[in-house]
Every structure is written in C-alpha cells, then in structure tokens.
Amino acid sequence: MTLPDAEQLIAALTEQIRPHVTADTAMVGIHTGGVWLAKRLHAALGLSKPLGVMDVAFYRDDYGKKGLHPNPRKSEIPFDVAGAPIILVDDVLYTGRTTRAALNELFDYGRPARVDLAVLVDRGGRELPVAPRFVAHTLETPLAPTDSLQLEEAGEGALTLRLIHA
Amino acid sequence: MLNPQLTKDGKLAHLLTLEGLPKSILTEILDIAAPFTEVAEREVKKLPLLRGKSVFNVFFENSTRTRTTFEIAAKRLSADVINLNVSTSSTSKGETLLDTVDNLCAMGADMFVMRHASSGAPYLLAQHLRATGRDHISVVNAGDGRHAHPTQGLLDMYTIRHYKKDFTNLTVAVVGDVLHSRVARSEIAALTTLGVPEVRVIGPKTLLPTDVERMGVRVFHDMREGLKGVDVVMMLRLQNERMQGALLPSSQEYFKVWGLTPEKLALAKPDAIVMHPGPMNRGIEIDSAVADGGNAVILPQVTFGIAVRMAVMSMLAGH
C-alpha cells in the first residue's frame, strides 16, 4: 500500500478547518504525533490562543491491563477551557479510545463550548462511537490490528507517515 | 534472593525501601511524578487511575503530614481511602499485626500504606501477602522504625532534581540526628544510587550510627567544615521522642553547635537549597531565618511529595 504524502495532507486539512475558525477557536494536540500536527495547523491557521498539549496516559482504559505507559509527559492547557470552542488534533484515528481518554481529560479542565476532532488519517477499526469532523485522508481498507501507522518527523520540520507491519 | 519489592519481570510490586532499588526505577518514579504536579492546577484535581481501588492508610505511629499527603495522593487518583489510626484501635486490644491486615484484606484492600515503629514491619506484611497468594495487594512503606522512609527519600530526590537538574555534579550534606533517622537512610541510599559524587553526613558522634562510613559518605563532626561549598543541605529533625538516655546536653546547646543559622549557611554555595522533612523544630536544628529564607525549599518539598506518592501508587496499582 502506498501512503499519501503527509505534507499534502496537512495542507488539505488546514484548508478544511480554515472556514470554521473563529477568534475564540482553541487547539489541543495529543502526544506525540498529534502535537507535531497541531503545531503545524496552529501556525498555518494563525490561531490567537496558545496551543494546548495533552498526554492521555493517565486516562487510558488499558491501565488496568497494561499498567502505566512509560514516560508520560505533562499536559499543558494554557487557555481557559470553559466556554472555548476546541479543535482536538491527533495524527491517526483508530479505535477511538485515545479520543475518549482525551475528552475525559479535557473536561477535567472545564466545560468547553464544543470539541471537534481533526485527524490526518482515519485508518478504520473504530471500537467507540467517535467520528472526526475534519479528516484529510480515509483508508479505503482498514489496517490490520497488528499494523501500526504513525506520523514521524522527517527533518527540517517536515512530517511523514510510516506504516509498520508487526 | 528475590528482591521482595520487584515482580518477576522487574517492575515495582511494593515500595519498602530505596536500598537496592535500581537507578532505572528511581528515575522512572521521578519521571512519572513530573506530570502529576500539574494536576493541582486543574479545575478537577483528579485522575481516574485508581478508580474503584481501596487504599488503606494503616498508621501504627502518629503522623500528620505523611498520612495526609498519602491520602491526597490516593484521592487525586480517584481511590477510596480508608484511614486507620491503629495505635488507638484493635492492636491495643491485643490483635496481632497480621490479623489486623487479614481483616482489612477481607474488607477488600488493594493497597496498604503502612507506618510502623518497628523496622521491617512492612516487609513482614509484604511477605505475608505473597505467602498467602495475595500478590495483587501492594504495600507502601510510609516509615518503619529507624529503617526507611522511601517516599520521603524520593520526594527529596524530586526536589533536588527540580532545583539542580543533575545529580552527578553535586555535593550534598545530610545534617543532624542520623542515628534515629529513617529519612536519612533513604536519602543516602537514593543519592548514592542516582550518582551524587559526594554525600556528607554532619552531626555529633552520639547521633551518628557507628558504621556510618559504610554507607559511602564523608563524615564531618564540625558543621562549618562540612557545609563548605555544598549544593544541598538536608536537615534532619532532632527526634527527641526516640532518644533514650542523655545523648545531648540540651536543645539550646544543640542549636548553638548543630543548628542551621544564616551564618553557617553562608559557608555553602550561594545558590544552595535547604531541605527539611518536617516537622521542624525551629530554634533547635534550624533557625527561623533559614527556614523562612530564600534558600529554603521546605514547602515545595511537601507539594512535590503528593506528586511523588501519586507516581508510586499508580505504578503499584498497574503492575
């Protein structure tokens, strides 16, 4: 399978989101790929509120089975969540469990006006009722559960998609 | 022998002492604690990690700060917390430690946080749980006799790392009543494991253990000499309640020779930090001018203690 070019997808995603941006729009990226992507979108869209970042390690539903994920990072939401329209950004949408965890964490900061999900690639395989509002690319055939699709840094600020077969 | 604190695959099963814990686990605890510090700034100061778990704080010895910070840590992780002040309860009616524990297990305990006046009591508890096939229940030592106070040692390491960034270029002085101090033992073990090149112990001969050099420290019986050029001053509390017989002439005398005054602190590096595990005896081991001064990080220690205890509990409950 040939993967689409991440840079082209980022440009397309930016234009999808742009008409819906208001002066109040805030953005939160989910570690790690989602933060890289969010930084790009945040700059391209010229959002005035500072970018938020979240590591959902403490909200994951597999903690009871797998324990704590190693190296959790600090979540930082440098704007008032209460009443804010928020675009939640992740690189790849899969089961929807990360999105669920991110929503739970976000609501512990306050009650947002609305939350929209923006992702670069929807790889299929949803296990929860989660749907993105903005999506740059949807895989026609969902990936196998053993496959891993992720965003990677390609140097000089560029991003690229990588598929790993287990 | 199997390290009773670790699971077969090398993860933390209980936290009993910092002695013998590998550097990788100490560092992992400090790394995990860092993001927990941010929870205190949220509207909802809670994370769901220990939701549905019951944490029993079993204190056979009095404590306010340690018990409270353990309670806050467990509650911020959404656990149900049950506080038992056992010194005023069943044991005074003759129940043994293990019978008390078995009863609490029957009430559905998932974790014990235990303080006991006897060194080794938390080990006994951990062994008992393993021997009776209750490996899923973890034990955190909240201070046992003169032996260990691992979470205090860890929060002290977190504090040092927060202010000094790197352990491998520091000179650290532990000052005062080392003989009776479980805090000092945990601190020295952790400092050594984390690669601090020079750990000094400063105190009167009567308040230092006879074999203190074997802990890998430089011993000073002159406080001014010992404080010269240090980066970190870790004060210890003078533990009057554990002293039998006349180890000291008087507390005024002690303050004169071993109390940390601004004048003595001036011998340390200008940016040295001053730590104290609490509760402080002002005017005995530490001058108020130092305790409230710009070098003191005693209150941040308390705040970091919550995050460090959250890290330990979330590692144990997920093992």
Image (cartoon, coloured by chain):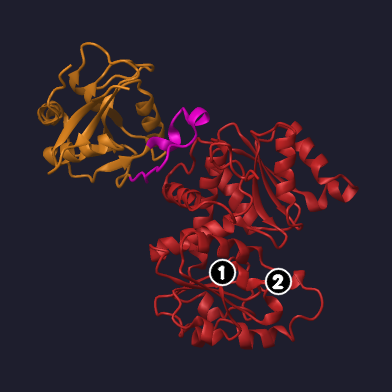
Q: Residue at x 77, y 73 (%)?
A: B243
Q: Which residue is mark 2?
A: B239
Please tell me the numbered disc located at residue B216.
1
Residues under labels 2 and 1: Cα distance?
Answer: 24 Å
Q: Is the residue A116 above or below the residue B130 in the image?
A: above
Chain rendered red:
B
Q: Is residue B106 above or below residue B230?
A: above
Q: Residue furthest front?
A: B1
Q: From the top left corner, tell me how far across and down residue B37 is, in percent.
A: 44, 51
Q: Residue furthest top?
A: A141
Q: Is residue A126 above or below residue B2?
A: above
Tell me if mark 2 has few (under 14), some (14-19) or many (20+) residues whose alpha carbon lies within 10 angstroms of its own: some
| Percent coordinates x, y for residue B221 in the rendering | 61, 84
The question of residue B39 being in magenta is answered with no
What is the secondary structure assignment of the residue under circle 1?
Answer: loop
Q: Circle 2 marks a residue in which chain?
A: B
User: Residue pushed farthest right?
Assistant: B94
Identify which amino acid the numbered label 1 is placed on. Answer: Gly
Foreground of the two, A127 or B40: A127
Which mark lies nearer to you, 2 or 1? 1
